[in-house]
Amino acid sequence: MIIRKKYLFYVLAITSSFISAAVTGIDSFVGGQSAFKYDPWAFAFSLFFIGAIVTLLISLILSIKHRGKSLGAKILDPSFKQVRMVQKSEMKYHLVAGLMNAINTVGYCAIVSAVQDPSVILSFSQIVILYLLLMESITEKDVPTLLEVQSSVIVAFGAILASISLTGEFQLLPILIVFLVVNPTWAIFSIYQRKLKIMKINNKPNDSINIRLWNLVFSCIFISVIVFLFDIFTNGGHLIAGFTAAINSYYFLLLALTMGTTFFAYVLYIRSLGMGKASVNNAIRASTIIFAIPFSILLLWLGVITEFSTDPVMLIIKVIGMIMIVMGIISFAVTVVKAYIFIEVKTGRSLRETMQKLWNIRGVSHVTITSGKNDFIVKVSTRTLMKGYERIIKKLDEIEEIKKYRWASVLKDWEKI
């Protein structure tokens, strides 16, 4: 089955958000159990420990071949063949992503354990979208456009309004943890997960299933070390408590359920990272707040949570926030413009130097040397057609090696699901 690439990106990102909302509900139930309610550190270790085991089992099942293709390639990611060892070229990215994921979890646990109602603090984690915009402007040559910045700000502050709770209280230390620990580590984690997804392994696209598997493995190692050191300095027993709870059959099943569900959410998220910017992905991911509503109602009905605000002012604020999220996501969806430029180079000119000059143009996402009439096919992605077109054409005119070129805008683009 094939689908337009633009639609596939949003289907993957929104589906991931929906599953993440379900995971949040499951986490609320699991985290409320007696073994974890007053020990978020043990909860964090248990999640990663069981998560690594469950993810490995799911990945092995998805490696089973059926009619020449693995189940994972048919169900989740066409690039997946089978479980493999980490390659040397991707090791540094896995180490950084794993460390950031572990530190992010530590920051989250610190907030949960320090604040009675963490939602009032954690709502500010949506500012990570702006962190990502800043990082992308530094690490990638495609500087965010004004439209991307505006849409991201709308989504970020809409998410804050939709998730904030008036029953909590503002505390300086937890807010500092969000801005200095939670947001930066998640931003770096997302950037490095994207780097892993777009890189080639043995001249083939990297797959999201192996990326998720090895991220869990490295995250589990790092969180074990962090909790162990924390226990030494505080004379605590969180690591042992987490391990003891994890091997308990009841808690094992609960942890396996939440991490098994999380696996699919993250695989879809990582795959969408390979198709769009991390900032745009996280802006769409903010829709989790909207999808969380029916799960919150279900948890209220089951008695997992006991309070659900019906204050008119509070409800209006949340609705305004949700509308802002939807508006921001729609503005992302309707403004992307892609094009191909077919280029002929003057006889005797260096293709390598010309390719480097083309690659240095902001907005260029792919450069290919071809045989035949055209020497280069350049792929362009921008969110402002006229401004982007004029800027790129001006840069092309400045390259003296180019004989002539032809611009062709992409009307529709399909990709296998």
Image: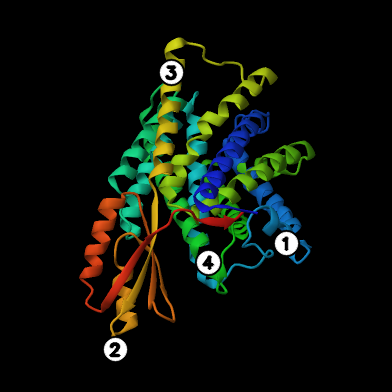
What residue appears at the point 38 percent right and 62 percent down from the top-left corner? 408
Secondary structure, mark 2, is: loop
Q: Amino acid at mark 3?
A: Leu
Q: What residue did someone put label 3 on?
A: 166
Secondary structure, mark 1, is: strand
- 369 horizontally vs 218: left or right: left
Q: Which mark sits nearer the N-terminus, 4 or 3?
A: 4
* Residue 241 appears in the figure: yes
Q: What residue did someone put label 4 on?
A: 91
Q: What residue did someone put label 2 on?
A: 348
Q: Which mark sits nearer the N-terminus, 4 or 2?
A: 4
- Mark identifier at residue 70: 1
Colour scheme of the rendered structure:
rainbow
Callout in the foreground (2, 1): 2
Q: Which mark sits nearer the N-terminus, 2 or 1?
A: 1
Q: Which mark sits nearer the N-terminus, 3 or 1?
A: 1
* Residue 120 appears in the figure: no
Q: Which mark sits nearer the N-terminus, 3 or 2?
A: 3
Quadrant in the picture for the C terminus: bottom right
User: Label 4 to label 1, Cα distance in Å?
Assistant: 24 Å
Q: Amino acid at mark 1?
A: Ser
Q: Is residue 369 above or below residue 91?
A: below
Q: Which mark sits nearer the N-terminus, 4 or 1?
A: 1
User: Label 3 to label 2, Cα distance in Å?
Assistant: 69 Å
What x and y, as percent, mark residue 236?
Answer: 58, 40
